[in-house]
Image (cartoon, rainbow, N blue to C red):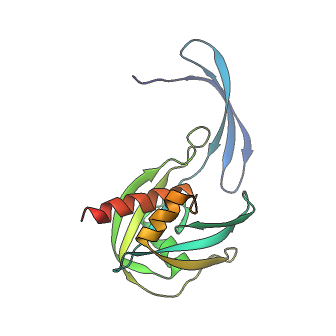
Amino acid sequence: MEHTEKTLSENTIFTGRIITVKQRQVQLENGRQRSRELVLHPGGAAVLPVDEDNNVYLIRQFRAPFGRTVLEIPAGKLEKGEDPLAAAKRELAEETGFSAAHYFSLGQMWPTVGFCDEIIHIYMAAGLTKGEIHPDEDEFISLEKYPLETAWNMCMDGSITDGKTLTAILKAARLLKNR
């Protein structure tokens, strides 16, 4: 059964460089009214680089909301009208220096469905060729290499906590196991 809410009104609270925050008044199925706070995001693309020996390459960078570095796959926001695969290729090159001969879709991830409409398109890259890393001027990252099995264990023991990275590693491990 599909459930729905009827929008009664909506106001923009904040418009920033990346996100827009809206407040929406809705009518629920039972007739009651509620207020919803929504974060609108352009979406993103992320990519898990996997080499011929089943090593994965992750980046470590500082993440302000948590006040610490986070281990994650290369990713970035989509520019208006940008193809997600093109964005994934761009982020792979910028953050790792790699290009890839093959890309495989690992699907989409909706990281925070309770208040945000962000959709992250996730890919696996194979047939890697090393090049020069060229991160954005405000990105300070380090590239780390792990056997896929080690990365999978890090997902399971809580060492890796980033949602897109968990999704990519767990899906890629299953995909590569079934080949």
State the residue in front, 176 or 112. 176
Q: What residue appears at the point 51 percent right and 60 percent down from the top-left corner?
A: 155
Residue found at x 44% / y 87%? 130
> How far from the left and from the top, in percent, is residue 79?
55, 61
Position of residue 126 relative to residue 15, above or below, is below
Give x and y (percent) for residue 168. Answer: 44, 60
Near-viewer residue (177 or 78): 177
State the quadrant of the N terminus. Answer: top left
**Considering the image in quadrants, where does the C terminus appear?**
bottom left
Identity of the residue furthest to the top in this view: 31
The residue at the far left in this view is: 179
Task: Identify which residue, 171 or 43, lies in the foreground.
Answer: 171
| Residue at 66% over, 55% down | 18
Q: Is residue 88 visible?
A: no
Is 122 left or right of 115, judged from the image as shown? Answer: left
Q: Residue at x 58, y 18 (%)?
A: 28
Q: Judge whether residue 143 can be spotted in this image.
A: yes
In percent of width and height, residue 101 lies at: 33, 78
Where is residue 5, by image quadrant? top right
Percent x, y of residue 138: 70, 74
Q: Is residue 93 above or below residue 63?
A: below
Q: How many marks?
A: 0
From what the image shows, is residue 102 above or below residue 3? below
